[in-house]
Image (spheres, grey):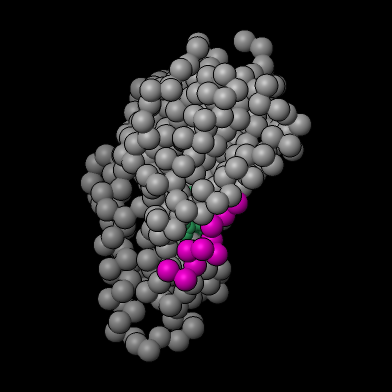
Amino acid sequence: TGSLTVLGIETSCDETAAAVVRGPADRQILSNVIRSQFDEHKAFGGVVPEIAARAHIEVLDKIVQQAMDEAGCSFDDIDAVAATAGPGLIGGVIVGFLTAKAIAMAAAKPLIAVNHLEGHALTARLTDDLEFPFLLLLVSGGHSQFLLVKGVGDYERLGTTIDDAIGEAFDKTAKLLGLPYPGGPNVERLAREGDVNRFKLPRPLLDRPGLDMSFAGLKTALRTQAKKLEPIDDQTVADLCAGFQRAVSDVLATRTSRALGLFKDRFPDVQPTIVVAGGVAANAEIRSALLEAAKRVDARFIAPPMALCTDNAAMIAWAGIERLRLGPVDDMAVSPRPRWPL
Ligand code: KG4
Ligand code: ZN
């Protein structure tokens, strides 16, 4: 295969994004435009689906135009249009996917319906030399899962959270400690000033086999401890943040070691690689815990640049390229899906 140029569109949550990517031979991000709806949702302490969909409608055409301009492309120059068709907040998914469909029809280009999770799963192949199979740990506000990525379209979920996603647990913990949304970065900042040993917090499910995770109990334990000390002072908040972050890091590192062991059993001749993706991958303590877990078993650890770990359209364009390199794609008949397991 030579090189394909694909326009990608992502609107499944609170980022309106468009990007133009070339590949698979030269792997170039020609543009990667993103507009966050942070200000629209801030006052509500979380993403409001209806507001998200309306905000996508308002800006998507301009974001797409900007992505095309920065890439120096016209619609004639691209080989296909790829857009997230799910899973996600359905209003936003509809806005992005139907916009992509309209562009594809008008420009007579193929349309590629990308699963958002597939976008995350394949990103490391855009940024690094990485062959299948590999392990992905996806940790965001909406997802916490271990995926075995065996090929394009060939994914196996090895474990997931049975309650809250990790980012969600960070956000809820922050909220109950009176910290602003989104919680993750604030918890991390305060944890630096905190004493990790002051509070004993549980490591849920750690004694159970498999790769499933649970974070709701951790949050509840933290709330119980916080309640006893009310009104809590700044140092206590920092200590609770430190204890919480350490508990999450421990759980993820232990689970990652187990996932790598499982990988070695199934693919004894392949050096294991663990890729991390999702907003929680920004957390320095979690990153270093994962890196250590990988080192212990001589595995590769890949953390793509943060702008490609969190929601973006370059990953959607890249997933489109990966699909296209395998043969012609025509997803005009596909409907947007709020739920769409890989
Ligand atoms: O991938 P992402 O940007 O959006 C989706 O959820 O799809 O992830 C956002 C999540 C939020 O829950 C946020 O609190 C969390 O990632 N997050 C962090 C950090 N930065 C963002 N969690 C822990 N530590 C961080 N530094
Ligand atoms: Zn995502």
Q: Residue at x 60, y 42 (%)?
A: 61
Using the image as rendered, state which of residue 141 and residue 271 is in the foreground. 141
Left or right: residue 84 compared with residue 106: left
Residue sitting at x 42%, y 34%: 85
The residue under the point 34% across, 87% down is: 230
Quarter of the image with the C terminus is top left
Residue 273 at x, y percent in the picture? 50, 31
Q: Is residue 144 above or below residue 115?
A: below
Q: Is residue 42 magenta?
A: yes
Please state the total of marks drawn on the protein image. Answer: 0
Q: Is residue 124 visible?
A: no
| Residue furthest out toward the left | 208
Q: Position of residue 338 (x, y in %)?
A: 33, 41
User: Relative to 165, is 324 above or below?
Assistant: above
Residue 172: % across, % down: 37, 66
Q: Residue 98 lies in magenta, yes or no?
A: no
Establish if 2 lies above or below 39: above
In the foreground, 21 or 60: 60
Looking at the rendered image, the quarter that the N terminus falls into is: top right
Q: Which residues are magenta?
A: 35-44
Judge from the rendering whether residue 216 lies leftward or rightward of residue 322; answer left or right: left
Residue 38, given in percent of the width and then of the height, sits at: 54, 61
